[in-house]
Every structure is written in C-alpha cells, then in structure tokens.
Amino acid sequence: MKGRLAIFLTVVVVLVVLVALNAASYVRVERPGDWEFAPDRSTMNAGATGTRALFEYLQQSGHAVTRWGQPPAALLAGGRERPSTFVVVGRTRHEFEKEEAEQLLQWVRRGGRLVVIDREPDARLLPASGRWRVASQIFEYPGPGVGAADVEAMTGGAPLVEPSQPTALTRDVAQVTRSRFAGRLRVSKERPRAVFSGGGIGPARRPQPTPPPATAPANEEAEEDVWEEEDEASPSPPQPAPTAAPVPAFTVDAEETSPAPVEHLPDGRAGAGALLVDYAYGGGRVVVLSDPYVVANAGINRADNLLLAVNVVAGAGGLVAFDEYHQGYGTTRHELFAYFAGTPILWMFGQAAVVLLAVVWTRGRRFARPLPAPRVDRRSKLEFVASMAELQQRARAYDLAVENIYARTRRALSRYAGLAAGAPAADLAARVAARSGRDARHLAALLQECEDAIAGARLSPRRAVELARQLRELERDLGILMRSREIRQAR
C-alpha cells in the first residue's frame, strides 16, 4: 500500500509540475488580423470579417435578433421563438447538408424570409422561382495576402453603387460601397415548354408548310414503260391516304406566371448584373446580397452600407436569426472545446492523458527478473495442531505426540537447571529438584518414562495423555511455559 501511495503521489507531483510549466510558459498570442482569403463571418467575431457590429447595432436599436445555434429542422417547429428572418452570411465553416437545405427551403415556402449574403452563394439555398433562376458570377478572388481591414485593398477601383429603383430594401440608401471582390447576380429564365394536343411535351415550334409535290421530267416516260411490267408482276402494297398535318396547339405552363426577381442594386460593372436581388418562393421570399463586405465589421461603416444592411436583414420585422450553427457554434458542436480554445487548458488535459497512458503502460511492463508471487498461509496455528493431532491419532503414533511435547519441555528444563540440552535425565531431574524443591525421584521417573516412550516402549493412548498432562503441569508450576516466555522475549 505504501508503494502504491508513493506512485500516486509521484503522478500528482508530475501533473502539478506540468501545470505550473504550462502556466509559466504560456504567452497569449494576439489574434492576427482577419484575411479575406479565409474569413470568419460569425456574429461572435469582432474582427474585420465578422458581423458582430451589425448584430450589436440591431440589438441596441430595438430589433429582435438572436444567434441561432440549432439545426434548420428546428425552424419548422412552432413556438414563440420562431424567427421570421433567417440570415446566412458568407461561406460557413460547416456546409449545409442536402437534408438541411431542404428543411430550410420548406420553412421559406411556409412564409419565412431567407437572407443569403455571399459572393458565391450555395446553389442549394437559391431555389428556382418558376422559370426564374438566380446565380452568382465571380470576377476576382481575394488572394492570401489581402487583409479585410485594408480599405484600399478591398475597395480599390470599385465605384460607389446607387440604387436602380426606390424599394423597401434601398430605403434611405443613396450610395453603397462594395468590395472589388463582390459577385454579380444574374437573373435568367428557362425556355418555356409547350404542351401539344397529341400529348407530347416539347419546345414550342411553328408548323412548317408542306412542300409541293415534284413533277416528273419528260425523259423519264420511257423508263416508266419499262417498269410497268415489273409492277404488274409484283404489285406494291396499298398506300394509305394522305392526311392533313395537325396544327400544333399548345398551352402555356402555369409557372410562366410567377413574378420575376427584383434587382435593387446594380453591381457597378459594365453589363447586366445586380448586387442585391430578392424574389418570391412559395409563401416566403429569398433575398440575395452578393458582397459580405457590406455587412462585415470592416465595411459596414462605409457610405450607406449600414442602412442597406439593416433594410436587408431586419426590414421585414419580426425575430431575426443569424445562423451560428453552421459557423461552428451550434448546441451540439462541442461547446466545451470551443470555450477553452486558445487557452492552455486543452494542453493540460492532453498532457494529463499522456501521463496516465504512460502509467498504465508501465504497470503492464516488467523491468526486472520475475519473482514468485508471495504465498500466504491461510491456515491458523490451531488448525495445524488439530490436523497433526488427528493424523497422529489415526496412525496411533502416541510416541510422536509425546516426543513433540517432551522435546520442548526438556529444552525449557535444561535452561531452568543451567545444563546442556543433552544432559542425562537423572542429572537434569536432580538439578531441577534442587532448585524448585520438588521430588527428584518422581521427576526423574517422569523424564525417563517419556524417553522410553520415544525410544519405542509400549504406550497406551490414556497413558500418553497422562504424560502430556504431567509435562504441562510441570511447566506451569515452574513458570517455564514456552509460549509465555517467547511472548516476553518478543516484547
């Protein structure tokens, strides 16, 4: 137990030393500036690429905002905390799964409002509205050395953008500062399909006129006479009567009546394209902004970007939920590790695990020669005496029983008389009698009878018991009990 306690204390001391070394050597590294090449669009990020400024402004200005840390399936559940607007900013750390995108679009069809702010939005989050589709086109990608806080690097050469028409999303917005990495939103329409009266479905085509029949030339009259005989020998099958070509009647698909997406802001480049588009989808709407710089911490204070961001995100009223689940701050994405990120606590746990594994490994290894396991005698002395007595009784070895007792008594009498252990019985009896005052002849007779029994003289069980009783009484009277003396010596 003492050895195990020492090992335990050693492990504790090692852990304390490791913790002290980590605490002494830990130096907090300042968070480097956000790079536009790998942005963090979370509302918890106060860096240049984050959206914390917008979130706190909406919160302080009285808008109902929240950080949504649950899967999109939770949007379909009813309740007071059900948001009316769901905002997805930038390329998230965890991509939307197919099932999650379908659940989010189902929530939009029920009347929700989805706001997607990204240069290259996920195509699964931009559903088609009837024949209308919205896609993004990228002209320039940010390099690894572009800092999000560098205004010149982000907006150099990009003109200010003015609203193309007064709408609810551009209310009070005069000019917007976009980055030169903004995407261009293109609105396209698929070719319509026509349903023919014959049941076939295909693209609508105008009916082509039937060409007039060609007239036979004059020099072929002789050839007709030659082939007439063969025609009579093998008559051709009857030809069906010609029918008039059907007129391709078609109807217009009902999806043709869906409204076109609204382009609120141009992208400021030559050619058709927009920076802000919204359109209806089912009972809700989808709003797409192709430049996260407008709502980021580094660009929200430029021109009227803040007014545009508030109109886009919170213009419809109700609870606005910013997607933090796919940014890595969800309720099921190891919040404990995220809480201790950037601190030496995780390293301490790792080193403790290494030490624990080392202890477990060393306990299962042998570093010296093998030693036999200690064998503990589970029998008591009384059990041993009882076993020996039973064996001697069954074997009728009464002489052996007397010998066991007499040998101990003789050694005690020799020490009492001051003689050697091999002294004759008569001399031993005389010296003991002289010292104790007992009868020398009776004592000599007792000793001689015991020696004779040991030598092989005939001995009955009753006499063996009587001899053992007399030897024990002699030890008691003289005060030479072996067990008592051994106990005193041990003390």
Image (tube, rainbow, N blue to C red):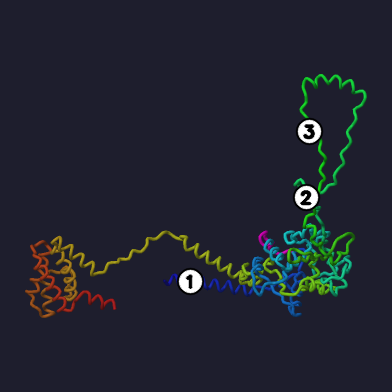
Task: Return the residue at label 1.
Answer: 8
Q: Quadrant of the N terminus?
A: bottom left
Report if the CB atoms under discs 1 and 2 are less than 8 Å apart: no
Q: Residue at x 78, y 50 (%)?
A: 195
Amino acid at circle 3? Pro
Alpha carbons under labels 3 and 1: distance apart: 105 Å
Q: Label 3: few (<14), some or many (≥20) within 10 Å?
A: few
Q: Label 2: few (<14), some or many (≥20) within 10 Å?
A: some
Q: Label 1: few (<14), some or many (≥20) within 10 Å?
A: few
Foreground: disc 1 or disc 2: 2
Image: magenta residue range: 91-100
Q: Residue at x 74, y 74 (%)?
A: 52
Q: Residue at x 87, y 66 (%)?
A: 156
Image coords of residue 489 (percent x, y)? 27, 77
Image coords of residue 376 (percent x, y)? 32, 66
Residue 240 is marked as: 3
Secondary structure beneath label 2: strand
The image quarter in which residue 280 lies: bottom right
The image quarter in which residue 93 lies: bottom right
Image coords of residue 304 (percent x, y)? 85, 73
Does the magenta segment cover residue 157?
Answer: no
Q: Looking at the image, is mark 3 or mark 1 earlier in the sequence?
A: 1
